[in-house]
Image (spheres, grey):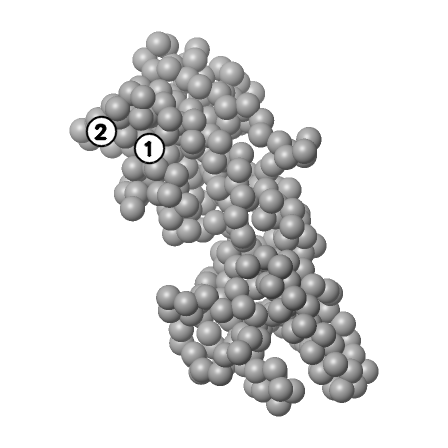
Amino acid sequence: MAEIIRLHYPILKNKKPVRQVVAMGFFDGVHRGHQAVIERAKSEADKLGVPLAVLTYDPYPAVVFRALEKPLRYLTPLAQKKILLTKLGVDKIYVMQFTSELAKVEPQQFVDDVLMCLNPILVVGGFDHLYGGNSSTADMMHLPFYAQQRFDVIVVPEFDDNHKKIGSSAIRRALDIGDMNQVNQQLGRIYQTTGLVVHGEARGRKLGFPTINIKTPELEWLPGIGIYAVKVKVGDDWYEGMASIGRNITFGDERPVTVEINILDFQREIYGENVTVTWYTYLRGEVKFSTVSDLIVQLNSDEYQTRQYFDTVN
């Protein structure tokens, strides 16, 4: 597993690490564009026979520059980002605390005071990566000038999918409308969240569709309101299910958003368990039914669609 090393500006001038390739980026989502950057950096590190490090940031830089319109959430919180980067061959993850002080650092100072502390032999970044403060020249095109021949620079060009730019912002927008096909296509994997199984209202059991209620960490980005075909990891095993993100509007207005999952062919009580949910496809939107009987008919239809979906993808 990659080692996480936390940094705060100004960085204490301790002993430098061994020479290494450094890939720079926020990498929220570790989507296919990010993967192209990391894979290029890994290839170069292997050629040079040196470790591969990533320089990333926490929290999201927008926190420093403006008031947030929505709660701060991530496609890949740091723990998941660590797992994904490790799978791509990263040896060290430098997590730089993004503060007001760091945001004021000019690009040359950033290179001198931050990058050089990492002892890079080569720095790799995506075409649109910015570093340091708000300077108009704090981009990858100008990095060779600031490097002053102390390290090499590789800029990875834009990675698109059928002429659609792959990017974290596009993935977030797709998540908000439940477009899991686009989300998963751009990520190159099935989108994943985590959570704790807690007590709910036990209404699903009375309807013949018992559900587990998931308390999702506040920093994780959930898909939009709707019904989804999912898989749930309980312990070491994966189970198919149908998930509802919504307000249960059939039973009242202005209810809080909850995450409930009916795990197919599963009868165990698992309160207090930490679970992982992979979001495969959107089935339908949330509907306010006039009768409970109509809701049960729809739930039977949802179960049929879910089973049919997994029969085709498994």
Residue corresponding to mark 1: 53
**Quadrant where the C terminus lies?**
bottom right
**Which residue is found at the position 28% from the left and 30% from the top?**
51
Residue contact at pointers 2 and 1, CB within 8 angstroms:
yes
Observer able to see residue 133: no
Residue 250 image point, x, y percent: 74, 79
> In the rendering, which numbered label is found on residue 264?
none
Above or below — where is 57 with respect to 158?
below
Residue corresponding to mark 2: 17
Please state which amino acid type lies under the numbered disc 2: Pro
Residue 186 image point, x, y percent: 59, 42
Please state which amino acid type lies under the numbered disc 1: Ala
Side of 5 where 253 appears, left or right: right
Observer able to see residue 90: yes
**Which residue is found at the position 40% from the left and 76% from the top?**
272
Q: Residue at the far right: name it.
A: 290
* Sequence-earlier tag: 2 or 1: 2
Side of 109 where 158 appears, left or right: right
Side of 104 where 305 appears, left or right: right
